Amino acid sequence: MMSGFDADLEALATAAGSARIKRSQLRRWPNGACSWIEQRPASGRRSILVVDDGTGPRDWGDPTWSMSSSINTYGGWSYAPRPEGGVVFVDSSTGQLFEASDARSARPVTSSEAYRYGDLVVSPSWLVAVREPTEGPGSELVAIRRSTGELTVLVAGHDFISSPALSPDERTIAWVSWDHPELGFDHAAISCGALGPDGSLLEVTHLAGGGGVAAHSPQFSTSGRLWCMCDATGFFVPTVLDETGAHPMVHDASDYAEPLWSSLRRTMLVVDDDEVVVVRRHGGVDQLGRLEGQRFVPVGASTLITIEDLTRGPAGAVTVLAATTTTRLEVHEVVLAAATQPAEVRTAPRGPQPFVVTTRDGVEVSGFFTPPLEGSGGPSPVVVQCHGGPSSSVDPSYDPMVHYLTALGLGVAQLNYRGSTGFGRDFRRALYGRWGVVDVADVEDFALGLVAAGLALPDRLGVRGSSAGGFTALRAARGSIFACATSLYGVTDLGRLAASSVGIEQHYLDLLIGDPTTDGHLYEERSPALHPEELTTPLLVLQGADDPIVPRAQAEALVAAVSARGGLVDLVVFEGEGHGFRNLDTITSVLRHERAFYAQYLGSR
């Protein structure tokens, strides 16, 4: 018979698995139905199309279908509703395009194994897509005439192409492109051209981005006006593009979009030139709003604090993919006329609370602190969580792990250290050349700020992180601030990571660390596996056996080196897991191991 703790643990692991359902790609169908893609832990690696026609969500299509795209490393839009009903989609296993008029059968549109497709746009006359070779670099923008199936290459010669948009009259097409060694989130450029009736592309014009400015997410209004997100002001803001240049439509110090990691996150919906719905991020919290002239006006419920996608809703409404402090990403309908105050974190006293520190070099770093579920309100043991990316970000939306740790009597700190997105270009680029240095300093200063505020016990601080966050946690484990550190598939050897990086990340470490040919000493100095003598803090290393990003051998080498010099380290390897844990048994085991680890070194329950 299970103990009460085991039953709670199993329930939490199940909840954690459910929270790992990934929803993306909201679309509105011509008949008014709304659809999205779901990836569920219980369905293996299938990407399932879910459609809600007003009677409730249901899986759409043959149970064997899986719709996902692997273009541009992190994927792109993998399906698009047809004007006459049904969808065009990318088959996950082959990368090829299929067309389905109903949920029972599909016919192939492409069949060449030399290419894979994504970022689909379907109009009455054209199917527009990005394709890239299955072997080797390069990306192309193609148009397929729907009446004949004839394919025309519109744009070639770029390493990466993303996010095509077609004007309502089908005469103008816009797209995003960039090339190595540039990174899309710093240099992505938008161009457009006239789409001729024969499928030719004429009058190609560069409109925005490039040269240290990034532009992405092109959208046409019903009148044919082209909008995008551009960071020419230092922040990603809604911008209108025309023959005279790029015109920012707001001028506040807030990001309205993330950098272009993939095309799947959409935070602007251009209905027409007088109805533009946007998402503004400030202080790590999102707010849905509409543009009135050049003014942001909040709409909808301020409880939606993380918004990753939006599409048209019923009249006077918008459909969003959003999270709250008690739920992960779910589909919500928001009435645009229901204006509210700007978003704020509305939680119980034991929920996540905004917290800000000024670092040792005078930079303001913000994040969130969640106190233990039960306690006196005084200082407590605290675990600091380091987000991945490393240029990702944290927010106060529901996280099962935070709930679990606080139930153990631990406070949890989450911070947006320098390099995090959502705080402007300068803050994001502050990590360049200093990954493993300023992020670690910010983590330490945030923890010490909690101590100074009477929220954390100075001798019972822990740190944990996964992937790039695991690297930051391991670097933080070198000092005397933290009593223990947990790395979940964390980066341990920067040189090996640089050698294995491909796709859009191929030159990322050139920015974060330096040129490997001239700055090799920095890669060596900052690699935890190469300096086990510096790891003086007890370590828990959780690793997937089949991880292609951080191979098992790297974790084993780190642990062997730390053990050889007498350090305290425990390695747990999970068979069948890669870079990120998905199986329910693995999640349950992770919870058990972390509970025992923190009970030993932080005194948690």
Image (cartoon, helix red, strand yellow):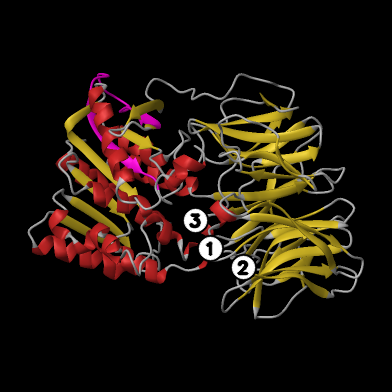
Residue tagged 2: 92
Q: Amino acid at mark 2?
A: Ser
Q: Amino acid at mark 3?
A: Pro
- Residue range in magenta is 365-387
Residue tagged 3: 41
Can residue 180 be seen in this snapshot? yes
Residue tagged 1: 45
CA distance separating discs 3 and 1:
8 Å
Q: Which residue is located at x 76 percent, y 40 percent?
A: 270
Q: Which residue is located at x 57 percent, y 56 percent?
A: 184
- Does the magenta portion include 371? yes
Q: Position of residue 442 (x, y in %)?
A: 31, 38
Q: Amino acid at mark 1?
A: Arg
Residue 255 sits above or below residue 266 on the image: above
**CB under 8 Å between callouts 1 and 2?**
yes
- Does the magenta portion include 370? yes
Q: Quadrant of residue 501?
A: bottom left
Nearer to us in this view, 181 or 16: 181
CA distance separating discs 1 and 2:
9 Å
